[in-house]
Image (cartoon, rainbow, N blue to C red):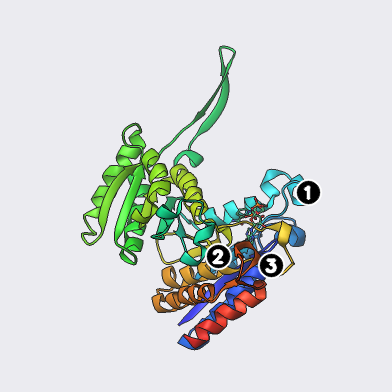
Amino acid sequence: MNCNIAVIKGDGIGPEIVEEAMKVLDVVGKKYGHQFCYSQILLGGASIDAYGVPLSDEALQIAKESDAVLMGSIGGNTTTSPWYQLPPALRPEAGLLKIRKELGLFANIRPAYLYKELAKACPLKEEISKEGFDMVIMRELTGGLYFGERKTEEVDGVRKATDTLTYDENEIRRIAIRGFDIARKRKKKVTSVDKANVLDSSRLWRAVVSEVAKEYQDVTLEHMLVDNCAMQLVRDPAQFDVILTENMFGDILSDEASMVTGSIGMLSSASLREDKFGLYEPSHGSAPDIAGKNIANPIATILSAAMMLRYSFDLDQEADAIEQAVQKVLEEGYRTTDIMSEGQRLVGTKEMGDVIAQTIENL
Ligand code: NAD
């Protein structure tokens, strides 16, 4: 298979971790007979330095013409970097919002997986974490409260602010279909999260998700109120497979779910649209505090590349190989600083990429 991948190395640790993901992809390509062609484009601070804008039209065009985008992370130290003296529309994050919007990425997936080797990093009690957990949060990314009309006014001398939460059935249906498709590739369970006891938008959400479920008889659907879900995530995270939810609930729940894994350097993410196209990036930021030191954990980016193989290219076996290799190197005790514990083998960014690549070769 030939795959054209737009690569955004980004800022801070971005270039270091993306190098390792490309190293791993190249080994996968060689072993399984695929050609991964990379077109490097700039986004964020690197693009501001080169072109004065966080995303150029040319870079956007290259991303649009590719089959998928693999990204490190963008941005700098928000207090000291000169990028943050610029008007908001010219700052690094404006480029990220623009590329997501222009590419029509409406579905965000963030897996939260507890490796038993890293169980000590999990802040939950051992009796809860000992079974491990493996879920994905599927969040609607382009609708709801964050994109509704808003205003701040003064009424009779009192300041008043209004945000509006709107979803139409098409927006709900397309993310629900994505959620059920992904559940089919996993443990075949969808937990749809809403606030249907209060909000009209949630009642429509629940109705449309239930309609979509009829087309997926092999997938179990349950509905859960968002406040209960926040509680269940720390009480019994093992019960979840795919959590399907709207924009703001997903924003909050995905951070909660990633926190309970305890290891930000391990968490991948994908933003998808209706077809196979997606943008894949680690859940963490550009970590400017550790950039250029060869100590960043590249695993979140490597696992994001695995998601790209699975969701954009339908290369499940190849994605499995990457995930198995990550599991194996953790079992063998390899650790970057952020996940290091006593008695394990401390390695740098490059070495972690090397051992994962080598493990794939030997699988
Ligand atoms: P961050 O995630 O970059 O860092 C938080 C902490 O986690 C830091 O101590 C960092 O050293 C550590 N960390 C993060 N990733 C790591 C890794 N792979 N290995 C080891 N340690 C790691 O969050 P922040 O400091 O709040 O943000 C820094 C910059 O990143 C900001 O400019 C922010 O806007 C940007 N950001 C970008 C994205 C993105 O590109 N999608 C996402 C979040 C934050």
In the rendered structure, the answer to whether residue 128 lies left or right of residue 295 reads left
Q: Disc 2 and disc 1: Cα gap in Å?
A: 26 Å
Q: Disc 2 and disc 3: Cα gap in Å?
A: 14 Å
Q: Position of residue 336 (x, y in %)?
A: 63, 68
Amino acid found under the numbered disc labelled 3: Ile
Look at the image and tell me in which quarter the N terminus lies: bottom left
Q: Secondary structure at mark 1?
A: loop
Q: Mark 2 — residue?
A: 300
Mark 1 Cβ inside 8 Å of ligand 1: no
Which residue is found at the position 27% from the left and 49% from the top?
222
Nearest to the eye among marks 2 and 1: give it. 2
| Numbered badge on residue 295 | 3
Q: Position of residue 290 (x, y in %)?
A: 72, 61
Mark 2 Cβ inside 8 Å of ligand 1: yes
Q: Mark 1 — residue?
A: 80
Q: Residues within 10 Å of mark 3 (few under 14, many from 20)?
A: many
Comes first in the chain, label 2 or label 1:
1
Q: Quadrant of ligand 1?
A: bottom right
Nearest to the eye among marks 2 and 3: give it. 3
Amino acid found under the numbered disc labelled 2: Ala
Mark 3 Cβ inside 8 Å of ligand 1: yes
In the rendered structure, the answer to whether residue 177 lies left or right of residue 259 reads left
Which residue is found at the position 32% from the left and 58% from the top?
180
